[in-house]
Amino acid sequence: TMNPYNDQHLKMYFYENRLKTFEGWPFEEDCLCTPENMAKAGFVHTPSENSPDTAMCFFCLKELEGWEPDDEPKKEHKSHSPSCHFIALKKKVEELSVEEFVKLQMERQKFFINKSNKDAVTKFREAGKLRRADISKTAMGEE
Ligand SMILES: [Zn+2]
């Protein structure tokens, strides 16, 4: 679910948990986008059938695919999502104060709300299309 306070989402603050998601990641050796570097940069592996190399930042929810061996995960993350607070952190998560963590979670919530709204708009538009098709049929007496 799209709730940044849910356990599944909270545990992704920790490197080890993000790293575990990179099973079957296509870049293992002789490259910059190894599972370790991906996880360090905040990514979790979110593969689908058509794109085995999709990764998403657990914090800003930015999804990136089409990775090249020379791509540096931190650099890619910063350039595609400059407003992500996690990639801009100067401290380790373990070193954050409670206050800092709460502030971070509030910022994170905005990304979750934006993503939820985008998904909702897509569904709304799809439903709207179907509904309009129904309405025009009715208007034309085809009911
Ligand atoms: Zn991010």
Image: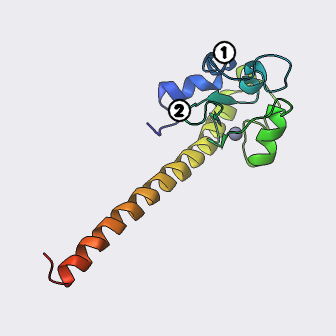
Q: Which picture quadrant has residue 43?
A: top right
Q: Residue at x 69, y 34 (%)?
A: 100
Residue identified by numbered label 1? 16
Q: Residue at x 72, y 36 (%)?
A: 86
- Specify the quadrant that holds the N terminus: top left
In the picture as drawn, the residue positioned furthest to the bottom comes out as 140
Q: Which picture quadrant has residue 137?
A: bottom left
Q: Residue at x 31, y 65 (%)?
A: 130
Front position in the image: 51 or 41: 51
Give the image's coloring scheme: rainbow
* Picture quarter with ligand 1: top right
Q: Which SS class for mark 1?
A: helix
Would you say the beta carbon of the disc 1 residue lies within 8 angstroms of ligand 1?
Answer: no
Front position in the image: 121 or 126: 126
Residue identified by numbered label 2? 49
Q: Is residue 41 left or right of residue 138?
A: right
Q: Is residue 108 above or below residue 91?
A: below
The 10 Å Cα crowd at callout 1, few under 14, some 14 to 19, many 20 or more, is few
Front position in the image: 15 or 36: 36
Q: Which SS class for mark 2?
A: loop
